[in-house]
Structure formats: C-alpha cells, structure tokens
Image (cartoon, rainbow, N blue to C red):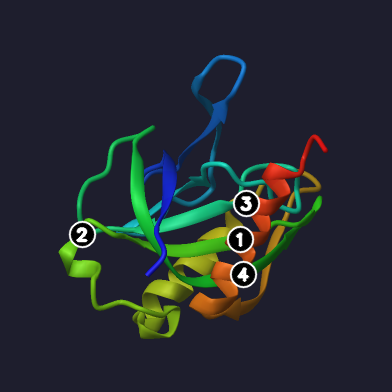
Amino acid sequence: MEEFDACIEMLAGSSLKHVYNEKLGKLVVHRKSAFPLPKNFNYGFIKGTLSHDGDPLDVFVMSSKRLRLGSTVKARAIGLLYVKDETGIDNKIMAVDSSDKTMGEILELSMLDKEKLNSLIYMLEHNKDGLKGRWTKVYSIGDSKKALLEIRASFKNFRNRNI
C-alpha cells in the first residue's frame, strides 16, 4: 500500500479552516466554515503535489486518533471525491491515517458507512453557504486506484511546475 505525507489544516469536528502560508511558513486562519467537519474526518493537503486548482492536492484523513493542527501524518488513499467549485476542478483524496490500527481494514471508500460519507459530502457542498458566488459540488466518487492516479499526477505536476 502506498503512503504519502498529509499536512493537517483542519481538525475533525472543527469549523475553523486554516491554510498553509508558504511565505510565513505556518498555518493561518482562512475562514469559518458553515458546517464543522464530521467526526473522524481531518482535512489538509498532500505535501509535494500540485492539483488542478494550482494548490496542493486536498485530502481528508480519517483517524480515530486526535490529530494535531499542522501535524504531518502518513496516510493511505481509499478513494477520490470528484469535486467542482466556483473556480473549477477541486478533487479531494479520501485517506486513512496509516498509523491508526483501527483504520487498517478500510481499503476502499465503499467500505465506509454510507451515513459518514454522506455527512462529509453534505458538509463539502454546504461549507460555503452564505459566501456570495461561492459553491462546491461533489459530482462523482472514485476508488483507491483512481485516487492513486490523481496523487501520482499531482506529484508529477509539482515536479514539472518550473520546467
């Protein structure tokens, strides 16, 4: 199973969204989301990637452990959410914390409880409520193989960004 480094910008249960500011070398508050992240879902980015939107590839990391804001965790992909927002494609990798033994049996997104996944999709599609002209739509779901293809392409984009 391939692992990658995920930097945590938003903790499970939180509605406070942070972003990593490269110039400052630290996380800064971005905004308050209309809905908090569902239990066990942490949000961040995959280090060393460049996504369609020009930012590092977004990732949701499931863990039963309490993760620290700004921490880097080893994660393993279980699926992909195909997402669009007001700026274009903004896909999200779904992953599990590799060090969390309780997550070891989850190999695919399809193995998640449907209610958990639906609550995450609802949060994603409504987290910009009240922000004029801002929206997010999850339009499809991919398996772990699709997620790995997206991750590899984003690593390649990052390596080739200045060529």
Establish if 93 lies above or below 55: below
For image coordinates 40% across by 83% down, the residue present is 114
User: Which label number is shown at residue 152?
Assistant: 1
Q: Marks 4 and 1: CB-CB under 8 Å? A: yes
Q: Which residue is mark 3?
A: 155
For image coordinates 22% across by 56% down, the residue present is 99
Mark toward the start of the polypeptide (2 vs 1): 2
Establish if 24 lies above or below 112: above
Q: Which residue is mark 4?
A: 149
Mark toward the start of the polypeptide (2 vs 3): 2
Establish if 63 lies above or below 5: below
Q: Dot 3 lies on which element?
A: helix
For image coordinates 41% across by 80% down, the residue present is 108
Establish if 78 lies above or below 157: below
Between label 4 and label 2, give the one nearer the viewer.
Answer: 4
Mark toward the start of the polypeptide (4 vs 2): 2
Q: Dot 1 lies on which element?
A: helix
Quadrant, the C terminus: top right
Q: Marks 4 and 2: CB-CB under 8 Å? A: no
Q: Position of residue 71 (x, y in %)?
A: 34, 35
Identify which residue, 85 or 132, lies in the foreground. 85
